Image: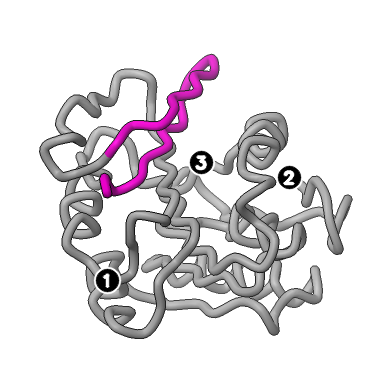
Amino acid sequence: MRVIAGKARRLNLKTVPGMETRPTTDRIKETLFNILQPEILNCHFLDLFAGSGAIGIEALSRGAEKAVFVEKNPRACACIQENLGFTKLTEGGKLLNMDVLQALRSLEGKDIFDCIFMDPPYNQELERTVLEYLSESSVADENTLIIVESDLCTDFSYVSEYGYELLRSKEYKTNKHIFLKKRK
């Protein structure tokens, strides 16, 4: 796994040992950031369920002003810190070692993020819980682009009930990205 483009281009990233995380492949990450490129420059990026931090680090490398990484697994947090140091992107990164909902509550009133990316464990409906929370949260407004990575079977038919507009869905062989914004 490596940084695809930007300041830290071609640098290899460490991954979290074991099967607790699923790193986004370089091919999928490249496709994702080709879609996100117009949003990234100088943005405030929130990486939820950050794992190794590869998505937030890619955003920083491509010009995001800052990235906040939320991860509760201590081994994954150590991996994120190592990757930020190795890529020399520590200054723009902030790591919150806590549960996602606890982290979101701690961020209330402090920042509005331009992009929020989440890649929660599959088949636990955590994306639904987070989207429900974000629908009433001050960390996301109608200009915030929310991207959810999930398995192909995950149902998102409920998003309009929470006040979201589904902008796009991009499917891959084994997973997909859903792009959402709060309705104005």
Rendered position, 105 above or below 62 = below
Is the image coloured rainbow, by chain, by secondary structure, or in one colour?
Answer: one colour
Give the residue type that dot 2 points to: Met
Query: What residue appears at the point 11 percent right and 37 percent down from the top-left corner?
Result: 161
Q: Quadrant of residue 66?
A: bottom right
Label 1 Cα crowd, 10 Å radius (few <14 / some 14-19 / many 20+): some
Q: Which residue is mark 1?
A: 138
Q: Answer with left or right where residue 169 lies relative to residue 29.
A: left
Q: Nearer the viewer, residue 73 or 136?
A: 136
Name, please, the residue furthest toward the top: 173
Q: What's the distance in space between the residues labelled 1 and 2, CA to CA?
A: 33 Å
Q: Which numbered disc flags the more N-terminal residue, 1 or 2? A: 2
- Indicate yes or no whether the magenta region holds residue 178: yes
Q: Which residue is mark 2?
A: 1
Q: Position of residue 41 (x, y in %)?
A: 69, 61
Mark 1 vs mark 3: give the one in front. Answer: 1
Which of the numbered marks, if any, corresponds to residue 87? none
Task: Name the magenta segment's main secondary structure.
Answer: strand
Give the residue type that dot 3 points to: Arg
Query: What residue appears at the point 24 percent right and 54 percent down from the top-left corner?
Result: 130
Q: Which residue is mark 3?
A: 22
Q: Nearer the viewer, residue 21 or 19?
A: 21
Q: Which numbered disc flags the more N-terminal residue, 1 or 3? A: 3
The region drawn magenta spans 165-184
Label 2 Cα crowd, 10 Å radius (few <14 / some 14-19 / many 20+): some
Secondary element at image label 2:
loop
Secondary element at image label 3:
loop
Q: What's the distance in space between the residues labelled 3 and 2, CA to CA?
A: 11 Å
Query: What residue appears at the point 40 percent right and 32 percent down from the top-left corner?
Result: 167
Secondary element at image label 1:
loop
